Image (cartoon, grey):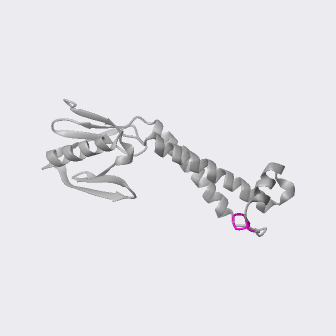
Amino acid sequence: MEGVEREYEYRPGRTVIVLFVFMALAFGLFAVLLDCKAAGDEHCPAALNYVIESSPDWLFPELPPDYPTWVYALSLAHVIFAVFFYRRRALRQRLVFGPTSMTVPASYWSRNEKEIAYRDIQDISERMYKGFRTLYITHSGGKETIAEATLPSGAAYMEIRALLIARAQ
């Protein structure tokens, strides 16, 4: 791309990462506690038994010996997802706007980039979900998504939105 006019970092903010790390820790601890509860008192350290015994009955009800392993798998999946999300934060991705085209990440997990000419943009739509805005850009090569939560600020999101609407016309 020639003549970079604007460039924005494109990755999840610290708040989102802290939330996912907290979720990973919470679900990881929950999986360990469920495993201890299912295994019985003699298989768990005293501290974990204390947490289980002092918790309300609805949090750790009596578990049958053949307690479904998908519950452990689900908790572990949350932990793995948070680790991958942290990895995503470490990637250096960016959105670059030039005079005739924009450059976006090739995929959510890639450092590669692809260029989209403004003239190829067919539609720009916006949706809000739980307070987060997302731009959907339909172009001749597919569809791109720009989420407000992955930009440095709400002001950057609004600049990008205005820039795309003005140049795609």
State the residue at coordinates (39%, 47%).
Answer: 149
**Picture coordinates of residue 36, whole percent (x, y):** 77, 57
* Residue 58 included in the magenta stretch of the image: yes
In-front residue for pair 131/98: 131
Q: Position of residue 86 (x, y in %)?
A: 51, 41
Q: How many marks?
A: 0
Residue in front for this viewpoint, 5 or 118: 5
Please tell me which residue lies in front, 14 or 123: 14
| Res. 123 image quadrant | bottom left
* Residue 63 % position (x, y): 75, 68
**At x 43% / y 41%, what residue is drawn?**
13
Q: What are the residue bounds of the magenta stretch?
A: 57-61
The residue lying at 40 percent from left, 58 percent from top is 130
Judge from the rendering whether residue 110 lies leftward or rightward of residue 70; answer left or right.
Answer: left
Main secondary structure found in the magenta portion: loop
Above or below, 76 relative to 155? below
- Tell me if 69 is positioned left or right of 83 in this view: right
Q: Note whether 62 is above or below 46 in the view shown.
A: below
Q: Is residue 18 above or below residue 68?
A: above
**Where in the figure is residue 116, as x and y percent of width and height?**
23, 44
Judged left or right of residue 8, residue 80 is: right
Question: Residue most toward the left?
Answer: 169
